[in-house]
Image: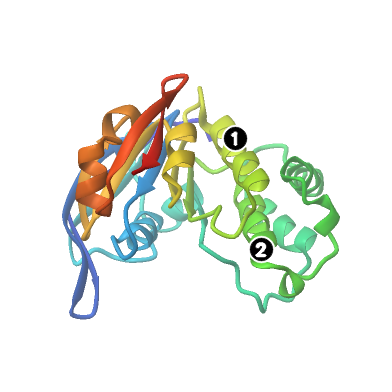
Amino acid sequence: MTSCVTITARALTVGYGRTTILHNMDFGPLETGKVIGLIGPNAAGKSTLVKTIAGIKRPQSGTCSVTVGSKVVEGRERTQAIGYVPQDLLATASLTTFESVMVSARRSEVEEWDPISATADTLERLGITYLSDRLISEMSGGQRQLVGVAQMLVRHPNILLLDEPTSALDIHHQVHLLEIVREEVRGTDRLAVVAIHDLNLAARFCDELLVIKGGRAIAHDKPKTVLTPELLHEVYDIDARILYDADVPVICPV
């Protein structure tokens, strides 16, 4: 899969029953070769937006379009183009790590593909080969998150879509995972969107940040442009100084 991909929202409104979560949202196009950090306070609508991009939630009005090449993809084509990692895998899954990742590998449309070798390589890359024979139902939340990422990576999708993939991981695995996501898309025709709470990790590993508050897109730009004391006060209700480490903003609450 090498076609350029984009994600664009226009007047996007999404809800559950009578409760509207995303309100007339506009953003994009989000473009290839970048990691886009999706940030905002709790209940801002990040997970709902991720599910809408994935095609799991349907808009009440407006559009959230995914293009591959020059074609807007829907249905099975959209599912195939996107590798979606939810916040947690089902803890009741009865497969081992190797089995579950190999099932995903068999869904890949990469030519001359060996699912067994691809599965082994992906587990090694994530540092979870030791979990190969472990049942998913016996794992911690952090281990299940890494297995979910492996299931996504092994398919080599056009779009990497991750919902809070670092929430149950220690700092070593957080950094390692985000480094891998960045390696996957930098200089390619692929795109990553990562919903993430840790603003300093987002600033260091994301090329752009899309800020959401109250179901609306507040800002979208490079981290050093987005992360200002004014925005942090408006969105998170905190006072903070912004320091810089090799041109990367570092947030210091005061």
Q: Is 200 or 11 nearer to us in this picture?
A: 200
Q: Residue at x 38, y 56 (%)?
A: 50
Q: Which mark is residue 144?
A: 2
Q: Is residue 89 above or below residue 188?
A: below
Whichever of callouts 2 and 1 sits on the residue coming sooner in the sequence is: 2
Secondary structure beneath label 2: helix
Q: Is residue 205 above or below residue 84?
A: above
Note whether residue 112 is visible.
Answer: yes
User: Crowdedness of circle 2 by 10 Å Cα count: few (<14), some, many (20+)?
Assistant: many
Note whether residue 9 is visible.
Answer: no
Indicate the amino acid at tag 2.
Arg
Point out residue 116 in the picture as x, y percentages from the top left corner: 81, 49
Q: Is residue 92 above or below residue 170?
A: below
Q: Residue at x 57, y 33 (%)?
A: 184
Instruction: For marks 2 and 1, give the CA distance.
Output: 19 Å
User: Crowdedness of circle 1 by 10 Å Cα count: few (<14), some, many (20+)?
Assistant: some
- Give the image quarter of residue 146: bottom right
Q: Is residue 130 above or below residue 209?
A: below
- Give the image quarter of residue 209: top left
Point out residue 165 in the picture as x, y percentages from the top left corner: 54, 54
Q: Is 86 or 53 nearer to us in this picture?
A: 86
Q: Residue at x 24, y 63 (%)?
A: 59
Q: Quadrant of the C terminus?
A: top left
According to the picture, the residue beneath numbered tag 1 turns out to be 179
Q: How many marks?
A: 2
Q: Is 106 or 45 nearer to us in this picture?
A: 45
